[in-house]
Image: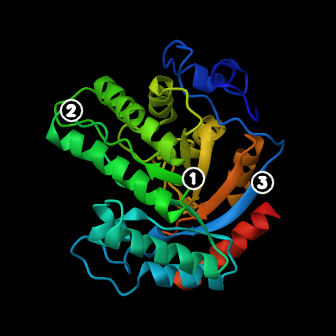
């Protein structure tokens, strides 16, 4: 296995700060870092459709671009991959049912990627598994399972999933337990379809490594689960330190161009340092640029892709 196991990671000197978080005793069934069959790190570059969030349609908002345009642009940059974020698909795919219009849309997009020499590096949904029992939570679970089906048809190997936040008047410990239970409910279906679920550090109950590790401790040990390492989402006093704590679990990596240390101004991301953190954890997989800053997105994305290429050279 590349990187330490869950138990040794929490107890090792390198992970001493994580161990001090006291996320609970090892159960023997909690999620372990992904087993890898090769030594050393390996990075492949991709571009997230979310970079064009202002240009793509979402819900009732009409867009000036389509996912086809994103595919073509990623190909123009000479990238090997593109992430086709779920929010921008038409309603027929959002409410996926096998066969018919949804499959035709997904097959056409998968073909466009193939014709352009692109791999679909992944996709994403905006779920909330921290909701209390009831219809709203059931709908979130059902939506995740539908998107697993859609991802399988599209050929996306991984879905970025979210945890959610503590409901008003709720308890964080209970919300974390509900999140882990929601993941566990979806994992068998993900395994059946050959799609990985990657939990993103995305604020709410995943705003700190302590919270992330608390969820991981309660997720079933499955090769189909891991972490979506988002380099820009920890707003803690030392985001780089905290990214290193979740890096051993990374099965997908979202790269942002800025970091936001708590109590300080936003600053340009140190790409070499971020790549080094993932490399030290033995990560092998996609580095997905997710551009969220100002300026012309195409111009800026091209610039930052060049910087990523330099960082992994």
- Res. 231 mark: 1
> How far is disc 3 from disc 2 in space, using C-alphas?
40 Å
The image's colouring method is: rainbow
Visible in this render: residue 236? no
Do callouts 3 and 2 mark residues in contact (Cβ within 8 Å)?
A: no
Q: Is mark 3 on a helix, strand or loop?
A: strand
Residue 305 sits above or below residue 15 on the image: below
Q: What element carries label 2?
A: loop
Give percent across and percent down for residue 144: 35, 48
Rendered view: 259 above or below 237 = below
Give the residue drawn at x 49%, y 29%. Answer: 210
Q: Does residue 179 show up?
A: yes
Q: Quadrant of the C terminus?
A: bottom right
Closer to the camera, 119 or 259?
119
Place of residue 6 in the rendered image (x, y in percent of width and height, measured from the top left): 63, 24
Q: Mark 3 points at which residue?
A: 42
Other residues around mark 3 within 10 Å, as few (<14) / some (14–19) / many (≥20): some
Q: Give whichever of discs 3 and 2 has the lower sequence position.
A: 3
Please tell me which residue is depicted at 45% across the width and 36% down the height of the picture.
188
Marks 2 and 1, Cα distance to the nearest angstrom? 29 Å
Q: Which of marks 3 and 1 is nearer the N terminus?
A: 3
Residue 34 in the image: state x and y as whole percent: 65, 36
* Nearest the eye: 185 or 216: 185
According to the picture, the residue beneath numbered tag 2 turns out to be 132
**What's the residue at 70%, 47% (across, down)?**
278
């Amino acid at each position: 296995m590349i990187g330490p196991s869950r138990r040794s990671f929490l107890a090792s000197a390198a992970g001493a700060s994580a161990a001090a978080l006291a996320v609970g005793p090892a159960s023997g069934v909690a999620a372990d870092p992904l087993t890898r069959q090769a030594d050393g790190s390996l990075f492949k570059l991709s571009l997230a459709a979310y970079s064009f969030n202002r240009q793509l349609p979402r819900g009732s908002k009409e867009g000036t671009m389509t996912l086809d345009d994103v595919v073509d642009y990623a190909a123009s940059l000479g990238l090997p991959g593109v992430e086709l974020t779920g929010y921008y698909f038409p309603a027929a795919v959002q409410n996926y049912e096998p066969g018919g219009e949804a499959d035709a849309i997904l097959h056409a997009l998968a073909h466009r990627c193939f014709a352009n020499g692109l791999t679909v590096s992944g996709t994403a949904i905006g779920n909330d598994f921290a909701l209390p029992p009831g219809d709203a939570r059931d709908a979130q679970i059902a939506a995740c399972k539908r998107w697993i089906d859609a991802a399988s048809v599209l050929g996306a190997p991984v879905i970025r999933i979210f945890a959610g936040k503590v409901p008003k008047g709720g308890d964080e410990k209970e919300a974390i337990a509900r999140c882990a239970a929601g993941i566990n409910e979806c994992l068998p279906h993900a395994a059946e379809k050959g799609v990985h679920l990657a939990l993103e550090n995305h604020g709410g109950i995943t705003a700190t490594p302590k919270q992330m590790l608390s969820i991981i401790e309660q997720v079933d040990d499955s090769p189909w689960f891991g972490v979506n390492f988002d380099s820009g989402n920890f707003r803690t006093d030392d985001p780089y330190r905290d990214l290193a704590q979740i890096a051993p679990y990374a099965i997908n990596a979202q790269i942002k161009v800025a970091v936001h240390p708590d109590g300080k101004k936003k600053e340009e991301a140190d790409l070499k340092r971020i790549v080094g953190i993932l490399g030290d954890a033995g990560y092998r997989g996609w580095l997905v640029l997710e551009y969220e800053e100002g300026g012309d997105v195409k111009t800026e994305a091209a610039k930052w892709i060049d910087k990523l290429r330099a960082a992994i050279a």
